[in-house]
Image: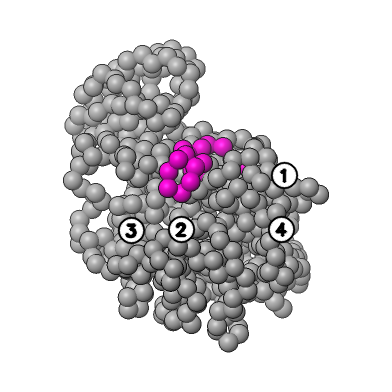
């Protein structure tokens, strides 16, 4: 067995240095150039499983006595093995099983990414998905086997059909491509964008009618912003071009407002020279003449973190230091407060589930967008319901992160996944492989089961309608992985929605019938996800009410669209253990 001494917390991380010199060298994706048109599912029905016993064979590891976060990396035939566990006594075994994959290499990386020399034990190890058996899925969740994708999924969006639209660069094939993934059957359907439209680093948002508007991208080979915008209809699976805006947008944000219009800001222009920012703030009305309306101008960092907060007001949480309101009707900016950490680039922000007036920004690069800082594990929150809102530091993550994603889960927690420990694009990327889940009520972060592939720049993570999470993409990784959070491994049955309407109207009651093992249950909405570059355009958690499973009861959607902008949502029933049902996708709209 492997013996550790000292009080250590182990987690799994993968460095590009190891990739460059290890068994992955020369195989940037790890997959063949030609892939099947359809993926075969390796998924198994979600069910509770007992925690396996600790294995007892392996090698030995030299003593390392500091009390702080450490990382043990074990490579074998291009596979990664690791274990997360807190050790509070000397001579504690960790469960790396012996297997048939040949020798492995041990390395130790500390919390700030510094590598420490260790004896190079020749260990026989099994792949990561088997060697983390000491983790309890009821506490840490579980990853299914990773699967190949025909493209690097730089952008991902959950469609009203239950499919996931993935767009990005095709693995080994020139051009820009898109595919629809059916996550339950693991089937892919190619739906490539028209012509030379390049969606890489675009902004996108889901409209009230279920279509997705894709704004901008890059005009290769000039690396300037793209002036064109397209709609994708998930029902007909067709792309339609809409009128151009004034200047190109590369790295813009686009969000659907409470009046169904789309607001877009920032991005690199095509008119002012390479690297110049588009300062136009524009809106587009899908029910109007179809033209973009210029409403104001402001210099903003790329991918501003925007949240619809009410009656034409949008709150910008970053990435710069100023938390500000923007009034879409008055075209006016109002400073609310400056953050404790002045800059948080390549960081996600979310509306805190259960607290719709609270905005949280998680980790990020503390310096400028082109160097001068380091990723941070700190987290800030502001409560906009307070008379004088102030940014405050809340519980930090266990590890610093940048280029990661944040996903709102049905049990009112937030999953932070992926990212890396360093910011220098020219040095090996030190990927963070262990996700964390934030509990807003307890103000705590819990490490959960590690994923198999680095999910750093150009990766995406979104919630699926069955309450699992899809992680995909990341630099050179044409792959995906699906995570089942701990709530899917609790004893007993999941709630089940028996009958629910197809559409909900603001302020009008509707009846819901469901089955559940518990008397207390919450009914919630989570807006369909649309994410890229650590930004998820529009995800939000909306509580509708509580009730028992014995008979249909009435629920009321929000009375006003600003609390939940029009569009498609996943309707979940969550029991008192925090276990969610499979969702029913419903449309929320005016009566």
In the picture, residue 328 is in which quadrant? bottom right
The answer to which of marks 4 and 1 sits earlier in the sequence is 4
Asked whether disc 2 touches disc 3, contact meaning CB atoms under 8 Å apart, the reply is: no
Which residue is labeled 1 in the image?
A: 390
Quadrant for the C terminus, please: bottom right
The answer to which of marks 1 and 3 sits earlier in the sequence is 3
Which residue is labeled 4 in the image?
A: 334
Q: Nearer the viewer, residue 135 or 219?
A: 219
Q: Is residue 282 left or right of residue 23?
A: right
Which residue occupies the extreme bottom position in the image?
289
Asked whether disc 4 touches disc 3, contact meaning CB atoms under 8 Å apart, the reply is: no
- In the image, residue 135 sits, relative to residue 217, either above or below, namely above
Give the structural element (helix, strand or loop) at label 3.
Answer: strand
Please tell me which residue is depicted at 34% across the width and 48% down the height of the picture.
145
Please tell me which residue is depicted at 37% across the width and 42% down the height of the picture.
424
What whole-number distance in Å separates the C-alpha atoms at marks 2 and 1? 28 Å
- In this orientation, does residue 232 appear? no
Of circles 2 and 1, the one toward us is 1
Please tell me which residue is depicted at 43% across the width and 43% down the height of the picture.
371
Which residue is labeled 3 in the image?
A: 152
Give the structural element (helix, strand or loop) at label 1.
Answer: loop
């Amino acid at each position: 067995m492997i013996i550790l001494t000292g009080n250590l917390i182990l987690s799994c991380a993968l460095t590009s240095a190891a990739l460059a010199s290890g068994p992955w060298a020369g195989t940037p994706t790890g997959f063949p150039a030609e892939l099947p048109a359809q993926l075969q599912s390796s998924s198994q029905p979600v069910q509770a499983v007992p925690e396996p016993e600790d294995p007892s064979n392996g090698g030995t590891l030299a003593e390392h006595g500091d009390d702080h976060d450490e990382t043990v990396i074990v490579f074998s035939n291009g596979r990664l093995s690791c274990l997360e566990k807190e050790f509070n006594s000397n001579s504690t075994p960790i469960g790396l099983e012996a297997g048939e994959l040949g020798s492995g290499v041990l390395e130790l990386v500390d919390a700030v990414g510094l590598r420490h020399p260790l004896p190079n034990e020749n260990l026989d190890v099994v792949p990561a998905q088997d060697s983390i058996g000491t983790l309890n899925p009821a506490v840490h969740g579980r990853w299914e086997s990773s699967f190949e994708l025909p493209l690097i999924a730089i952008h991902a969006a959950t469609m009203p059909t239950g499919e996931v639209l993935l767009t990005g660069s095709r693995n080994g094939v020139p051009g820009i491509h898109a595919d629809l993934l059916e996550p339950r059957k693991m089937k892919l359907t190619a739906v490539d964008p028209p012509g030379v439209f390049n969606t890489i680093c675009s902004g996108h948002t889901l409209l009230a009618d279920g279509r997705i508007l894709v704004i901008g991208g890059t005009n290769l080979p000039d690396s300037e912003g793209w002036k064109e915008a397209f709609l994708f209809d998930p029902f007909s699976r067709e792309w339609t071009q809409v009128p151009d805006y004034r200047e190109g947008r590369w790295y813009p944000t686009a969000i659907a407002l409470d009046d169904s219009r789309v607001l877009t800001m920032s991005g690199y222009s095509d008119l002012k020279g390479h690297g110049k920012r588009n300062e136009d703030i524009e809106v587009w009305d899908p029910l109007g003449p179809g033209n973009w309306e210029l409403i104001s101008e402001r210099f903003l960092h790329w991918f501003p973190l925007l949240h619809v907060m009410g009656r034409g007001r949008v709150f910008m949480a970053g990435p710069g230091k100023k938390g500000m309101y923007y009034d879409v009707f008055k075209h006016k900016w109002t400073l609310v407060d400056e953050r404790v950490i002045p800059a948080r680039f390549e960081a996600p922000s979310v509306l805190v589930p259960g607290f719709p007036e609270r905005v949280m920004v998680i980790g990020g690069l503390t310096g400028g967008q082109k160097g001068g800082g380091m990723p941070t594990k700190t987290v800030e929150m502001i409560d906009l319901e307070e008379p004088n809102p102030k940014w405050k530091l809340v519980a930090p993550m266990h590890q610093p992160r940048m280029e990661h994603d944040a996903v709102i889960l049905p049990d009112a927690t937030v999953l932070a996944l992926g990212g890396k420990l360093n910011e220098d694009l020219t040095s090996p990327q030190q990927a963070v492989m262990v996700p964390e889940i934030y509990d807003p009520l307890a103000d705590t972060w819990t490490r959960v089961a590690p994923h198999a592939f680095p999910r750093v720049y150009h990766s995406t993570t979104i919630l699926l309608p069955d309450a699992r999470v899809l992680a995909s993409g990341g630099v050179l990784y044409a792959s995906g992985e699906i995570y089942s959070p701990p709530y899917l491994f609790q004893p007993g049955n999941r709630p089940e929605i028996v009958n629910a309407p197809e559409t909900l109207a603001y302020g009008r009651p509707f009846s819901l019938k469901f089955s559940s093992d518990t008397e207390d249950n919450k009914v919630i909405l989570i807006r369909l996800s649309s994410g890229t570059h650590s930004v998820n355009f529009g995800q939000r958690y909306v509580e509708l009410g509580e009730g028992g499973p014995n008979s249909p009861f009435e629920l009321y959607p929000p009375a006003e669209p600003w609390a939940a902008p029009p569009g498609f949502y996943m309707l979940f029933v969550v029991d008192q253990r925090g276990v969610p049902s499979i969702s029913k996708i419903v449309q929320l709209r005016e009566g």
